[in-house]
Every structure is written in C-alpha cells, then in structure tokens.
Image (tube, rainbow, N blue to C red):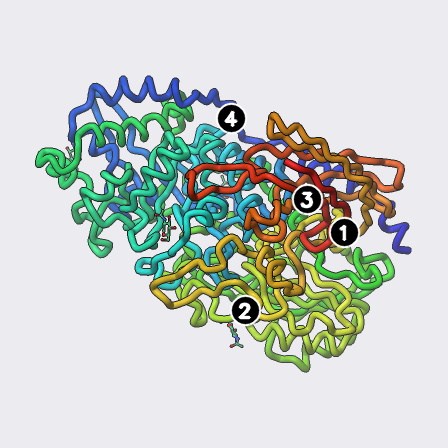
Amino acid sequence: MLISSISKASSLLLMVIIGASSTSTVEGASHVNLRSWDEAKVLAKELVGQMSLEQKVNMTTGMGFNITPCVGNTYPITNPDFPSLCLQDAPLGMRFAYNVTAGVSGVNAAASFDKKAILQRGEYMGAEFRGKGVHIQLGPAMNFMRSPEGGRGWESFGEDPYLTGVAAAETITGIQSQGVIATSKHFIANDQEKNRHEESSNIDDRTMHEVYLWPFARSVEAGVGSVMCSYNKLNGTTACENEIMNSLLKEELGFNGFIQTDWWAALSTVDSPTNGLDMVMPGNMDQSDNHSPSYFGANLVNAVKEGKVKESRVTDMAVRIASAYYKMGQDKNFPKTTLDSFNPTPKGSVNVEANHKELVREMGAASVVLLSNEKNILPLTKADRSISIIGSDAFSDPLLFDRSKCGDFGCDPATLIQGWGSGTVSFPSYIVAPLDGIKARAGKNVKIQSTNDNYDLENAKKIAQASDIAIVFANADAGEEYISVDGNVGDRKNLTLWNNGDNLIQAVADANKNTIVVIHAVGAVLMPWANHPNIKAIVWPGLPGQESGNSLADVLFGDVNPSGRLPYTIAKKIEDYPAAATADLEIDYSEKLNVGYRWFDHKNIEPLYPFGYGLSYTKFDYGKLKVKVNGKKNQVSAQLQVQNIGHVDGAEVVQLYLSFPKDAGEPPKILRGFEKVFIKAGGHHKQSVKFELTKTELSIWDVTSQSWVIPHGEFEIHIGASSRDIRQSATFQL
Ligand SMILES: *[C@@H]1O[C@H](CO)[C@@H](O)[C@H](O)[C@H]1NC(C)=O
Ligand SMILES: *[C@@H]1O[C@H](CO)[C@@H](O)[C@H](O)[C@H]1NC(C)=O
Ligand SMILES: *[C@@H]1O[C@H](CO)[C@@H](O)[C@H](O)[C@H]1NC(C)=O
Ligand SMILES: *[C@@H]1O[C@H](CO)[C@@H](O)[C@H](O)[C@H]1NC(C)=O
C-alpha cells in the first residue's frame, strides 16, 4: 500500500522537486543591467563632484524615524539631483507593507541546502522590494547561532561559516539582480540579544577571520552594496565606531559599497566616519525624539569645517552611496516609492506578490527536516483513514493579523511561521495553517479531528486515541530584544517548547502508538520525549512562512520527498553546547574555531541530531571518491557518484568536510562544500557530484603573516550525508 501511494505521486514529485531548484521562474522579476563597481564609481564621482559639502553630508544622513515612508530614508538632493533612498526591513521579505509575500526564514533557506532555491528566494524578494520602490533591502542577516538561545539566530543561516557564506552570497546575488541594494548584517558578532548595546564580543584574530568575517568576505565577492554595523562592541569598541570597518571591510576585503548603522547604533560625529561609517540611520540621535538632530547632518558639516573630519572622507562616503545606486542601475526606470511604513493601508498598495507563494511553498517543503521515521510511518497512506491534529501550533489565529496587538509578531498564540522583531515580514491576507493544509490534501474520505487546547491533556488523549494517526504540534519562538514575549527578552530563556508543548506531546504519545511530532521552532529545542516508543516520526519544518500547511502536507503525504538538513546541531542537553547567551558584558568567544558541530566533534559529544542531518523517503548510496590534486594551482577536486537505491525519487545533500593537517590547529573537520542533487529512484541512475576546492577552502588565517596560507601536510576529505554520517574519505598532500 505504501508503494502504490508513492508511485502515483512520483511523477508529481519529480516536477515539484526539480521545480524547486531548476525550472520555476520568478514572476515579476525584472531584467536589470548591473554595472561593475568601476563603471559605477565613475558616475558616482562625476555626480558627487558637483555637490556642496552640505549636499554630500545630506546623502549620508537619515531624515528621522517614523516620519518618512520607509523605516529609513536619506535626505533628497536637488541640483544635482539624487533621490531620497528608501531603506526597508527585513531579511525574509517586507515589513510594514501590504500585498507582499511572507516567505521562509533565513534559517529555513539554509536548511534547504539548495543554492538555486536560495538564489530564487533572493530574486523574488528583490522583485518585491523593487516593485514597492525600495532602494535598499535590510538583509541578509548573517550572524551566528553561536548559542541556541540567541534571539535573532533564525533570521540568519545557522552555525557554520561556510554554509552562511554560500547562503549569503546567493541571497545577495538574487536581491541585487533586481536592482535592489542588499545589506549584509550585522557587522559583526551580534550573536545574542541580551545587553546587545553594552556587551563586547571579544574575538581573537584567527577566529574573527575564519568564522565571523568569512560570510562578509563572501558577500563582498558577491558584490554586496551595503553592510550594516551592529549595536555591540567588538574588543571593547562599538562596532559602528570601530576601525575594523576600515581595516577589515574596506582595506582587507576591498568592499566598495557603503556602511550604514543599525537603527540608532551611531554614537559619534567624528569617530564613526573617521573609522569608516558612511551612513547614519534612521538619523535622529535621540530615539525618543524623531526630529532630534543627527550625529551627521549639521553636526558633521561643522566637524568638517572645524577640521575634525576631512572633507575627502565625506566625499568618499557620498561616492560609496552613489556607487551602490549606480551599480544596481537605480538611475534608470526605478519605480517610485509607494510605502507608508508607519501607517500602512491596503488601499492603493501595489501588489508585488506575483507567483511567489509557489516558490514559498516549494521552499517550505524543501526545508522540512525529517528527524525520525520509524517503520516508514511517513508518508501517510490510503490506509490512514483518520487523523487527529493536536496543538495550537497547527492553527491560525486572528491575533496573528492584528498589527496593534501583535506588532512585529511578538506573540505566540497559534502556528509559528517566523520569529519576532524588526526582522519580520508582514503577512499577506492569509496563512495556510497546518490544519488547513492537511485537511485540503487529505480530502473528505479521511476523518480529521482536532483541538487547539494545549492544556486539556485528557481531551488531547481522547482525540488522539480515536484515530489511526495522531499528529501533535508544538513550537518555540524568539526574536529581537525590544519585545518581550512570555518573559523571553529576545533570547530564549530556556530551550524547552512553549505553551505546555512537552506535556502535550507526552500525553498524545501515551495515547496513540502512531504519533507524529511536528515542531515549528526558531532553533534547537530539548526533546525529552524523542525516544518515546509511540513517537514514530519527528518532522521539523522550522519557520516556513505563509504556505506552512501546504508545504507540510506536501511532505507528510509524499508529494515531496523531504530533503532539508539541519543547519545547526540539536544537542541532548543544554550543557553540551559550546556557548550560552550570557548576561556578561565581556563575552569571550573562547570556543574559538569550534562553533557548532565542530565543538561536538572536538569534545567528542554525541548530539541528538547532528548538523547536516535529515532523512529522506528513499536511500542513497555513495560510490568511490576520487580526488585529484593540482599542487601548483592550489586546486583539489573531488568526485564521486551517488545513486538512489530506494523506491522514490528524491534529492540528497552531499556534504564535503575537510580535515586539515594535524598541526594546522583546525577543528576535527569543517564543511567546505555541499551539493543538492536530485536523483531518480531505481539504482541505475547515477549522479556524478563534483567539488572544487580552491585557495579559499584550503587556507587558514595565519596571524603572524596576516594572510591566508595553505598549510603543508596531509589533508583528509570526508563526503557524507551529515556531519556524523561520513560515507567516503580520502587523503591528499599539499
Ligand atoms: C540638508 O538637510 C537639511 C535638513 O537636515 C536641510 O535643511 C538642508 O536644506 C539640506 N541641505 C541641502 C544643501 O540640501
Ligand atoms: C581582538 O582582541 C584579540 C585578543 O587580544 C586579538 O587577537 C584580535 O586581533 C583583536 N581584534 C581586532 C579586530 O583588533
Ligand atoms: C492587498 O491586501 C489586502 C489586505 O491583505 C487585500 O484585502 C487586498 O485585496 C490586496 N490587494 C490586492 C490588489 O491584491
Ligand atoms: C521555557 O520558556 C517557555 C516560553 O516562555 C515556557 O513556556 C516554559 O514553561 C519554560 N520552561 C521551563 C522549564 O521553565
């Protein structure tokens, strides 16, 4: 019965999975001719050369908060003309707007491990921002899940620098292909919310380069137009006044765009611009007075006149801003800004949604991580005649749409599709809740019973008992520190599920021997029930966006074969993690290079579910790994064949981990490549998978010479289906 339901679905499956990463087109996308930085700089210098000091300064200064169309606007300039630039949140879609798409969160984009899909996500977001006349999207977020509690970790791409770097670069390329400036943020080490304005992240030089700066290096290579400096301090100096803006970003990485502040992160008129800051946001220095003066504006004009800041620095600031504008072709046919962020109404709003919900549905499904699946209880089959759906997380709720009571999504009454804070997107007119998606897919021959009461455990048990399959839902939320939800001030105060989730799961599992657990979470949670004999499957859709229920149903019913992989480690207990979100004002990043799974390898701690892990409805076999070394060119290529030896078509995420020579001082192994490959079932279809390692992947940061060097000695390549499921290894010498 299993097989028949699957084979029926498999032609559809083929379309959907290939569609997610190669045939879908992004409707509403424009074809923009981007300029090179050199071409853009020529135009920028010509423009800025005609400007007075006041005009140049005004280009770098925000007009104040809550009084302009966007969350940030620069002053417009006339004669010569330069528009007021519109800057708008967020990394996963547009905040404070109507008729926009609420897609998957950054951490889900990472969980897809699908470069093409991440690129397309960037493209459709760019198309939506362009469509509303937004010049600068405030994303991607690229901070780290250094500790699982970190409130904004879900906006970014997980715990690994390589994965974060690839996801950031694809996102930036996608956004900017639409002529919208992307913003890499937050620079740098803004990895928790607690005391984020006071704490100092203290990081040694090598760790800085190999972990925290790494994704910014990949962003600069991808041509990112803007970088946002963060609230926290780095080694004791506020990021937005820190000389690393000049030394690391502009000199070492060769960044050509402009550095803007996080909102109200600027604290000075002289130190900030002198050390590399180019734009102050939102402009007013006093957060309680929207019209208060700026650290830039008239103050910066005076500082130049008093000789405290060089005028050439101000010219450079304006040139950098104009360069990003010209690079993205915003001087030609850029739509006029139609946002009204602080008083948005649907009336007259430009609808930019196009077909993007299809991409969101595909990506929601492609980022579901299947953690366990005993006796192939999934996908659901025709024999499953009755299903109970239990838990508030399976439902929608009017509160989610109430912007006055649940602003920036600081509430958790129902299903969770994103965290809270400024990094959120406005929903369109609907959310497909899990219950709706499952009902629609199951059809009327399946009896569905449900409850959204997480506290009436007797009732939950009664409903669970009465059906063939019980699906129980729970979630865990987090967000930005200016909103506190259930005592969680941004960062999570614990790693347990919310709203009585653990007790609900336990009760349902006690009552039904075919229990399936579904978790919507911002990051790792503790799962004390993971080994309950009645829990046959654990499904992890993360933060899937507006099509949540459809994406989930696609996977539960086998229309899509799950292929998401964990972009972070799920530990057995909280003490196992390398770092916690702490109240200390001096935060020493003492785990150094051993972030995430590297720590678990280094300390030999067995995780509950490792980084890179996720099951499929089929099985893959890895052929023999062949490695070729071109020592002169510092190039290493690795190739192998992967076969689908199961009964359904599906996608595998083939991962390459590298072990450096012993005395290089690296973690036991680190991710240095991944490819998501779709392979038809039947075993005779072999897919060749190839990795190219260049100097970037083979080097370590040498503190003495202040350069990237390739260590000499024996390297080992490990190819696996997760960081703890290595299938093939081979050594080579450099
Ligand atoms: C610059 O902006 C200020 C507002 O801060 C405005 O009064 C002034 O006219 C602008 N100057 C120029 C030259 O555009
Ligand atoms: C921060 O301090 C550490 C320890 O002294 C040092 O190794 C590192 O280079 C410093 N980072 C920067 C950017 O100055
Ligand atoms: C815009 O969104 C509103 C509210 O979500 C909806 O009622 C309206 O139909 C949408 N407009 C368009 C043009 O789609
Ligand atoms: C952890 O926090 C959540 C959300 O605030 C809360 O529901 C739960 O009861 C807390 N768990 C413990 C063990 O205190």
**Which numbered circle lies on residue 30?**
4
- The secondary structure type at the circle numbered 1 is loop
Residue type at mark 3 is Glu
Q: Say if 621 sits above or below 59 in the image.
A: below
**Which numbered circle lies on residue 716?**
3
Tell me if mark 2 has few (under 14), some (14-19) or many (20+) residues whose alpha carbon lies within 10 angstroms of its own: some
Residue pictured at 74% horizontal, 55% vertical: 556
- The secondary structure type at the circle numbered 2 is loop
- Asked whether the residues under the numbered discs 1 and 2 touch, taking CB atoms below 8 Å apart as contact, a structural biologist would say no
Q: Earlier in the sequence, mark 2 or mark 4?
A: 4
Pinpoint residue 344: horizontal percent, then vertical percent. Answer: 38, 47
Mark 2 CB in 8 Å range of ligand 4? yes
Residue pictured at 66% horizontal, 28% vertical: 630
- Asked whether the residues under the numbered discs 4 and 1 touch, taking CB atoms below 8 Å apart as contact, a structural biologist would say no
Q: Quadrant of residue 439?
A: bottom right
Name the residue that disc number 2 marks: 495
Residue type at mark 4 is Ser
Pinpoint residue 31: horizontal percent, then vertical percent. Answer: 52, 23
Tell me if mark 3 has few (under 14), some (14-19) or many (20+) residues whose alpha carbon lies within 10 angstroms of its own: some
Name the residue that disc number 1 marks: 616
Residue type at mark 1 is Ser
Instruction: Quadrant for the C terminus, please.
Output: top right
- Asked whether the residues under the numbered discs 3 and 2 touch, taking CB atoms below 8 Å apart as contact, a structural biologist would say no
Residue pictured at 54% horizontal, 62% vertical: 397
Comparing marks 3 and 2, which lies closer to the viewer? 3
In depth, the one of 617 and 128 nearer the eye is 617
Q: Earlier in the sequence, mark 4 or mark 1?
A: 4
